[in-house]
Image: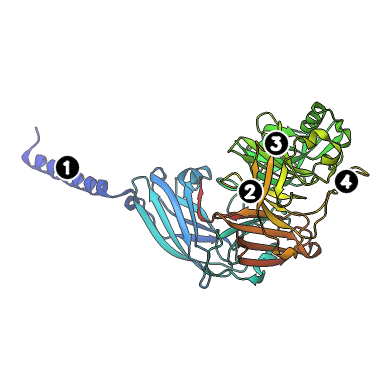
Amino acid sequence: MKSPITLFLWILLTILLSACGGKDHDKTQAERAGIGAIAQAAGATPFVAQLSHTLHDFSHLDSVHYTIAARPGTHSRPVSVTYDRAWLGRRAAWDGPSERIAFPVFGLYANHRNELTLTTRFRDGSLHQSTLAVVTGAYTGPATLYATPEVRTARGAASPGFDYMLVKNGITMPVILDSDGQMRWAGAAVANSFSSLFGDDAFYLGDQAAPLLHRVDVDGSVRSSRLDDPRFTNFHHELARGKSGFLAELDAEVGGVRLIESILAEIDLSGRVLKEWDLGQIFRAAMRAGGDNPDNFVRDGVDWFHMNSAIYDAQDNTLLISSRENFVVKLDYDTGAIRWLLGDTGKHWYVNYPSLRALALRVTEGKAPIGQHSLSVAPNGELILFNNGLASFNQPAGAPAGQNRSYSTPSRYAIDDKARTAREVWTWDANRELLSDICSSTYEGAPGQYLVAYSSLAARTKARLVALDGAGQVAFDYAYPSEVCNTVFIAQPFRLDGLRLR
């Protein structure tokens, strides 16, 4: 039995411990997180900084969000990025023994005092917010030409329908520009980003010289995976989202014979091939079934097809593929069956092969695609592309190569699968003054507002990025020196003003 004094002390201690525990229990997870001063270090380029701070318990963390204030006098919306806890966990951002979390901030202006707001959210809904300044130096890497565009039309207060652009190029990793023409991200390695995209968590680049898929973190670090099929030798042209992976345009070697730009494969993040469409086999089968001999159309070892764009359309479970030499072809995703062909009817495929002529759509309004690039599908199902206007390079001797136009345009088509017709429902010809005969792109940002990349103007010495609406009103126009289409292969609207990494 406790003495009265011992009992009194025991009761007092219990009350004190209870009170302490109660006070701690009443605190939010943000209050208990122990977030202190934020340390910062320079990243691989001035567009990236590495931040870190104390964090007592990673299990309570929901996300980390930051915004970068817009530069005075600019109109692009501020960079706004959220890192999910899962993304931070995969990259081992939290160090348990030191109770410290580290993460990159990207999208900074170079040579500028960047004002940041950092918001840490916890699972109970509580927040911790900090403000800090990150001072960056000038950018001096391989993409310096993007820092000094020729401003033909500056962006004003009116929105062009997007605030950031992802520029795929032959100089370096993808470059992010804002709609004011300012550089906001560039990497420090991998010298070609023709075959690239931004996934849910990082940039992904297909190697132009090897069967390698490179994963490039937003901090610029690179990790590579090799394709698991030894037939494939390299990536070329575009990389796009597929039904369950990435659509990769690949070269291959089979039995000592090169299959050039005529194979599409769906791959996962590790380089495993999930599904494959060999356009040579597909067209041989269709032409034979239609009573034609395909030997002078499908020619292994020759760039007879020249695939330069391939996308998945979830609206009807199909693939849309651009053959620069011939047409746009629509395939059934599951079977590979040809649904239709759309292109210049003055070419070899239409003139000489009834089996292919029977698959052609009839253009009832406007002009057919010629030498087209950069396919996309609008929410209403209409097909958008860049209509280059250049005839075929690699038709057999004596076969018709089709028309050559003196100008290029963005084009949009309404397609009636049942009636087998196509109408060019929107285009912009810039008074027929602009010819970009290869590469180039057209993508819709907000409905009726477009980003058009002219990759190879002025005899392939200049590139231009033009934002315009359906009425042809130009929101901005930036020009850059180029060599062939190295400066701009493709430019796509990009969400750096609400990006979430998962």
First in sequence: mark 3 or mark 4? 3
First in sequence: mark 4 or mark 2? 2
Percent coordinates x, y for residue 242 in the rendering:
62, 39
First in sequence: mark 3 or mark 1? 1
Q: Which residue is mark 1?
A: 14
Dot 3 lies on which element?
A: strand
First in sequence: mark 4 or mark 1? 1
Percent coordinates x, y for residue 215 in the rendering:
63, 46
Q: Residue at x 68, y 32 (%)?
A: 275
Which of the two residues, 378 or 34, is positioned nearer the viewer here? Answer: 378
- Say which mark, if any, is on residue 258: none
Crowdedness near tag 2: few (<14), some (14–19) or many (≥20) residues, C-alpha within 10 Å: many
Amino acid type at image mark 2: Leu
Q: Which residue is mark 4?
A: 400
Mark 4 or 1: in front is 4
Mark 3 or 1: in front is 3
